[in-house]
Image (spheres, grey):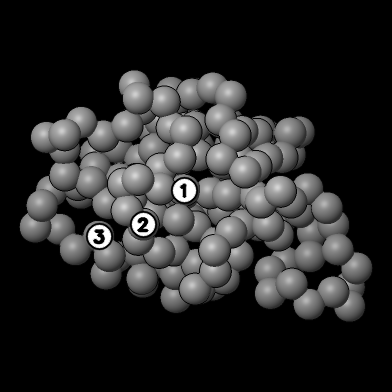
Amino acid sequence: MSNEVYGYVNCPPQQSVAQFLRQLEQKSGIGISQIPFEELYNIPETALPKTTDVYFAFLISDKPGGKNASYLIDALDYAPEADIGLPRLAIDRFSKLVALLKDIAKEDFVSRLVVAICDSSNIEDVMHLKADQLEDVIGDDLKYNSPPDRVYFVE
C-alpha cells in the first residue's frame, strides 16, 4: 500500500506555478513535483479540470524527489531515534501538510485547489470546502482516519 497526496491547482497561464511550488518545497522540506494529467488517478470526473482550464498537476511526497507520502500521512508516532526526515509525531506531520496546502490555497493566482489524500489511489468521496476550512476539515480527517481516501475541492 502507498500513501499518496496529489492534485492540481487552476491558475492563469502566465503564472509560474512550478517556481512557486519549488519555493514551497524548499521552505517546507516536503516534496512537490509536477505530474501529468493522467496521474490524477481516480479523481472523479466532476472534480477534474475542464479541458479549457489552465492547471498545474502535482504530487506531494515525504521529501523532495520522493514518489509517495508514506510517512507524511501515516497516523503512527515514531520512536525518537527514527530517522524519517519528518517530525516523528503524526499530528506534527499532518500540521506540516495542512500548512503547505493552506500556503497553496491562499495564493492570489490559485482559483481552485483540488487534492486527493489517499491510500493506493483509493478515492471514496469528494468534499467541497473553502480555503479557511482546510485546517479544521483536513486536519480532523487526518487525525481520525488517515489516510482519509478523499478528494478535497477547495475554492
Structural crowding at the residue carrying mark 1, measured as other residues with C-alpha within 10 Å and reported as few (<14), some (14–19) or many (≥20): many
Q: CA distance from mark 2 to mark 1?
A: 9 Å
Mark 3 lies on residue = 17
The residue labelled by disc 1 is: 6
Q: Position of residue 45 (x, y in %)?
A: 35, 25
Q: Is residue 70 left or right of residue 129?
A: right
Element on which disc 1 rests: strand
Q: Earlier in the sequence, mark 2 or mark 1?
A: 1
Q: Amino acid at mark 1?
A: Tyr
At a point 16% along the width and 34% down the height, the residue shown is 51
Name the residue at the left extreme.
14
Against 111, residue 96 (above or below) is below
Q: Can you tell which of label 3 and label 2 is closer to the viewer?
A: 2
Q: Which residue is found at the position 54% from the left and 22% from the top?
A: 125
Residue type at mark 3? Val
**CB-based contact (under 8 Å), mark 3 and mark 2:** no
Q: Residues within 10 Å of mark 3 (few under 14, many from 20)?
A: many
- Asked whether disc 2 touches disc 1, contact meaning CB atoms under 8 Å apart, the reply is yes
Q: Residues within 10 Å of mark 2 (few under 14, many from 20)?
A: some
Q: Position of residue 16 (x, y in %)?
A: 19, 63
Give how far across and how far down residue 128 sits, in percent.
Answer: 43, 23
Please give the residue where the numbered disc 2 appears in the rendered image.
35
